[in-house]
Image (cartoon, grey):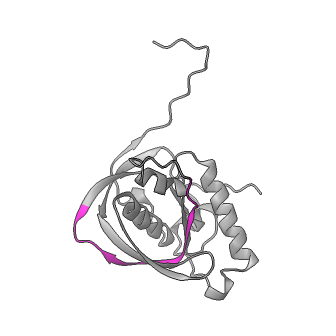
Amino acid sequence: MKTIIVNKDAPVLREIAKPVAIGDIKGKKIQDILKRMKIALKREDDGVAIAAPQIGESLRIFVVSGRVVSLINQNSEQKETFPDIVYINPEIIKYSKKKKGVEEGCLSVRWLYGLVERSEKVTIRAYDEQGKKFTKGASGLQAQIFQHEVDHLNGILFIDKAENIENLPPRPKKKKNEKRN
């Protein structure tokens, strides 16, 4: 099951994604989409989240990588792996007034990075992959991810809001036998 992450020119990224019927969440179609999203996200070493439109599905779903929890807890001695977290029909119900400029990139807008003003804290309401409703407060990186992914579901790319956009492709990795300067 090969899933391709679509690039910034794909029309699906500019659509307002459709809500998922709660009764469909446990069905084969939605569960297959979630599986494809998780596979695509895992393939990207620098990926922290992915929205359904990024794999060509105009649905209000995003997945946050378990790596994010590890990043947030990086000062912790724990070396646990955390599961990916699914957000279906997410709605940010509260934004802090305090905002901050944060650097962002996107799996669909490869190697472009820019500064985006985001609320420092948000509260989100969504359904999980079992169809259970939940509410979660977040700050810092997690709040930034929620805002970025909800933008995707509303047809907005970070480059629409970003300042000081730079193209920063990865540097080629040195081969084991290659001399270093």
- Estimate the x, y position of residue 122 in percent, counting from the top left: 34, 71
Nearer to me, 27 or 107: 27
Count the marks: 0
Nearer to me, 161 or 21: 21
Q: What residue appears at the point 63 percent right and 49 percent down from the top-left corner? A: 43
> In this picture, is 59 found above or below 107?
below
Q: What residue appears at the point 61 percent right and 18 percent down from the top-left corner? A: 176
Residue 127 lies in quadrant = bottom right
Nearer to me, 66 or 96: 66
User: Along the horizontal axis of the image, is 23 left or right of 85?
Assistant: right
Q: Is residue 111 visible?
A: yes
Quadrant where the image shows the N terminus: bottom right
Residue 136 lies in quadrant = bottom left
- Estimate the x, y position of residue 20 in percent, counting from the top left: 60, 82
In magenta stretch: residue 87: yes
Q: What residue appears at the point 59 percent right and 48 percent down from the top-left corner? A: 44
What segment is highlighted magenta in the picture?
Answer: 81-99
- Estimate the x, y position of residue 13 in percent, counting from the top left: 54, 65
Nearer to me, 116 or 11: 116
In magenta stretch: residue 139: no
- Single out the residue that lies furthest toward the front: 77
- Estimate the x, y position of residue 16 in percent, counting from the top left: 51, 75
User: Along the horizontal axis of the image, is 17 left or right of 91?
Assistant: right
Main secondary structure of the magenta stretch: strand
Q: What residue appears at the point 50 percent right and 71 percent down from the top-left corner? A: 153
Quadrant where the image shows the C terminus: top left
User: Along the horizontal axis of the image, is 143 left or right of 110?
Assistant: left
Q: Is residue 5 visible?
A: no
